[in-house]
Image (cartoon, grey):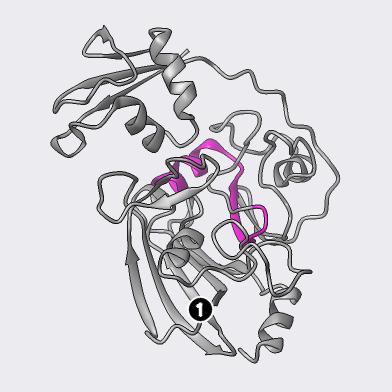
Amino acid sequence: MQEKKIYITEEQAGERIDKYLAETEETLSRSFLQKLIKDGKIIVNGKGIKPRYELNPGDEIVLCLPDLEEPEALPESIPIDILYEDADLIVVNKPKGMVVHPAAGHNSGTLVNALLFHCGNQLSGINGVMRPGIVHRIDKDTTGALVVCKNDKSHTCLAEQLKVHSITRKYCAIVHGEIRKEEGTIDLPIGRHPVERKKMAVFPNGTSGRKAVTHYRVLAYGQGYSYIECQLETGRTHQIRVHMASIHHPILGDRVYGPERCPFPYLEGQTLHAKVLGFLHPSSGVYQEFIAPIPVYFLELLQKLKLL
């Protein structure tokens, strides 16, 4: 059983507890949280409550989460494009279509399965047997640079850098529409979609979601599309995809947040690539930056759209 405490501020007061927790605890669904409340696994100020309980300033919420029984991920001989490797970490260039770690519907063929074969038992254990070494992740159809830790010391160090937003993460993307403002910042909170639980959404009024900031600049535009670079200040789920869609420039190929019909039927998923990843090395303390080459399919699209 895992116990987690949350303290409520003035800003969060008045919100239903099940709704609030569904937005802040992204891995837990609202229905599952309601069940936990009914089972007495979520208490406020030492007492049981109902799902419709409205939060008050100073409330202490205690979540008692049952331990997950995770099957052990198995090593698989899958090729990995390695950008850098040493005794502490490995930086890989994740291909399109590869899931980062095993989950429902993706029990094999993941990056974790490949890493277990390549690294053996030399991966950090902080995230458990299903996500060894994984500090951050990118979507299945997003390509590019991802760092994986080989020991808990490195994992803790990089997780702290992520927490304070000091890691450099630059992405390139092709989006619908010609963005006339050459650069800008999207500062809109992101949280779980109130109806479609597999999607994220922006909350412009700030009443829900978590702070999310994306900086973008236009590299080229024409023929109804723009080629852009995005730099993450925060790292919310689907952040760039949700933010670009919120300003009416969804990413080409993104059938979740953009048009359901893609003008290029052969395109599988969004044209989003994690090109630059930079951080302080956990052992040396020296800043290092890694560049993942833009994939061939992406370059061909840029040429087709005359964005290169």
Identify the secondary structure beneath mark 1.
Answer: strand
Q: Residue at x 79, y 69 (%)?
A: 266
Q: In the displayed image of the protein, which residue is found farthest to the right?
A: 77
- Front residue (pair 164, 282): 164
Q: Position of residue 80 (x, y in %)?
A: 77, 55
Q: Which residue is mark 1?
A: 228
Left or right placement of residue 153 versus residue 261 in this view: left
Determine crowd level at label 1: few under 14, some 14-19, many 20+ residues with C-alpha closer than 10 A: many
Q: Residue at x 19, y 31 (%)?
A: 14
- Front residue (pair 184, 245): 245
Residue 149 within the segment the image draws in magenta: yes
Answer yes or no: is residue 41 visible. no
| Quadrant in which the C terminus appears | bottom right
- Front residue (pair 199, 290): 199
Q: Position of residue 226 (x, y in %)?
A: 53, 82
Number of numbered discs: 1
Q: Residue at x 59, y 31 (%)?
A: 125
Q: Residue at x 14, y 25 (%)?
A: 58
In the image, which residues are magenta? 140-160
Residue 228 within the segment the image draws in magenta: no
Amino acid marked by disc 1? Ile
- Front residue (pair 258, 267): 258
Q: Is residue 217 above or below residue 168?
A: below
Residue 192, by quadrant, is top left
Q: Is residue 53 above or below residue 86?
A: above
